[in-house]
Image: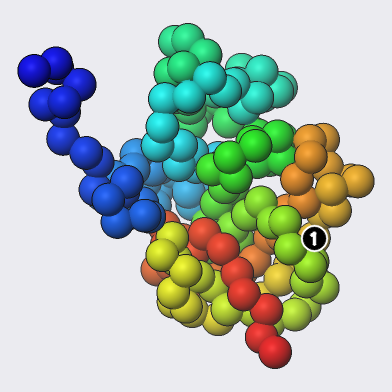
């Protein structure tokens, strides 16, 4: 039997979504210093726009099929990686405000408006909290091919909210 057949199938592949335990994320202390990229890229596929477009070289890869690694001390929170990730697998998280955390997500649906209240969703698509849209960047304003929406959420949801749903 080949070694590949003996490898355990990752939980996220079986369940269809990532869990916090599957990820390496910055600590709350690191997030409190300012915006940081949070990379949630689970597969080894030939892809490197995040590392190629990072203006300060904070994202590196051993090879094009590797996992992106981020140096949180070098990240400047510009969100260029979010805008250029074709897999929609990078988010900006900023918990430097006392009023909660801002999460910038890649978004490919009808864009919300600044000030709009939306539902903050977890990786499974379940509502976890209410969120307020604080910034919208259209695809045309983006350095890549992806629009982004930034939402403010309570700090306890900084590692959970990864999408939004507009309230009808």
Q: Nearer the viewer, residue 23 or 43?
A: 43
Going 60% across and 45% down the picture, which residue do you hit? 88
* Pointer 1 local density, CA inside 10 Å: few below 14, some 14–19, many at least 20: some
| Mark 1 element type | strand
Residue bearing the label numbered 1: 136
Position of residue 118 measured from the top left corner of the image (x, y, whole percent): 64, 79
Going 49% across and 64% down the picture, which residue do you hit? 161
Q: Quadrant of the N terminus?
A: top left
| One can see residue 100 in this view | no
- Looking at this view, name the residue that lies furthest to the right: 140
Position of residue 68 measured from the top left corner of the image (x, y, whole percent): 48, 25
Going 48% across and 48% down the picture, which residue do you hit? 31
Q: Quadrant of the C terminus?
A: bottom right
- Looking at this view, name the residue that lies furthest to the left: 1
Going 49% across and 52% down the picture, which residue do you hit? 32
Q: Nearer the viewer, residue 105 or 18?
A: 18
């Amino acid at each position: 039997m080949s070694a590949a057949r003996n490898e355990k199938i990752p939980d996220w592949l079986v369940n269809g979504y990532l869990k916090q335990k599957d990820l390496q994320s910055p600590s709350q202390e690191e997030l409190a210093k300012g915006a940081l990229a949070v990379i949630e890229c689970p597969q080894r596929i030939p892809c490197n726009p995040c590392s190629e477009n990072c203006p300060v070289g904070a994202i590196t890869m051993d090879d094009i099929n590797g996992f992106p690694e981020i140096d949180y001390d070098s990240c400047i929170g510009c969100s260029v990686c979010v805008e250029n990730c074709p897999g929609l697998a990078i988010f900006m998280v900023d918990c430097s405000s006392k009023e909660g955390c801002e999460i910038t997500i890649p978004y490919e649906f009808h864009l919300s408006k600044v000030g709009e209240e939306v539902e903050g969703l977890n990786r499974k698509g379940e509502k976890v909290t209410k969120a307020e849209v604080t910034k919208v960047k259209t695809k045309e304003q983006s350095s890549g091919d992806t629009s982004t929406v930034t939402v403010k959420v309570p700090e306890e949801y900084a590692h959970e909210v990864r999408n939004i749903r507009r309230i009808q």
